[in-house]
Image: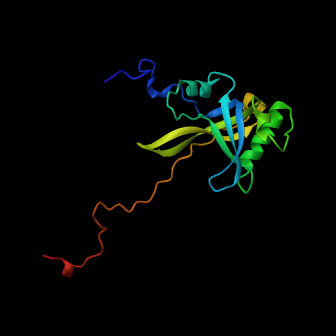
Amino acid sequence: MKKPNNYDEYQLGGGKRLPAGGYICKIMQVEETKSKAGKEMVTISLDIAEGEYKGLYTEKYKNNTNANKKWGCIVYALTEGEYINTFLGFCKSVEASNGVGINWGDNFGAQFKGKTVGAVFGEEEFQGNNGVATAVKVRFFLPTEDIKNNNFTVPEKKCLQPQPTNDTNGFFPATDVGDDDLPF
């Protein structure tokens, strides 16, 4: 077997992992798109702007040699309907963090690139290929001043709910069987 590229540089554990908490983030891109259900939404790509984890997602992206690599910190926010709160919180937090208003209309997403916003990340369980795993994801947005002043609470870990199973391994639950029904 030929030695794989980057074998000597590979770090076990996938490198640095962002802990749950509040971070000042740099907005890399905001793109208008549609959800799988056809609803209007934006995708917000972020990186950490300050502190020990500054540039974490840029570093991970650059070091990823997978041909189908994806940006590691994307928030999907509906811009219509009952789940609009993430989008509204994002817009209001960007305004407060940068002292600017939102320009609505054409080329909406371009105005956000390079601006900062506060983001609170929390742990979330998901069903991975090898069982339950945990990821750290943006749970909500705040003005950067709230992050700087520790004016936020890290949310509790979102755990998967146990799924009911019908797997009986070929056995069925015992029922109340009288002695007369026994085969011996």
Q: Is 103 in front, or is 153?
A: 103
Classify residue 166 by image quadrant: bottom left
Residue sitting at x 54%, y 29%:
17
Residue farthest to the left?
184
Instruction: Give the percent coordinates (x, y) of residue 48.
Output: 66, 28
Q: Is 82 in front, or is 151?
A: 82
Question: Is 163 left or right of 1, judged from the image as shown?
Answer: right
Instruction: Give the percent coordinates (x, y) of residue 91.
Output: 79, 41
Instruction: Give the percent coordinates (x, y) of residue 72.
Output: 59, 34
Residue sitting at x 49%, y 31%:
66
Classify residue 6 by image quadrant: top left
Q: Is 138 in front, or is 177?
A: 138
The number of callouts visible is 0
Instruction: Give the percent coordinates (x, y) of residue 148.
Output: 74, 28
Residue sitting at x 24%, y 79%:
178
Q: Is residue 169 above or below residue 147?
A: below
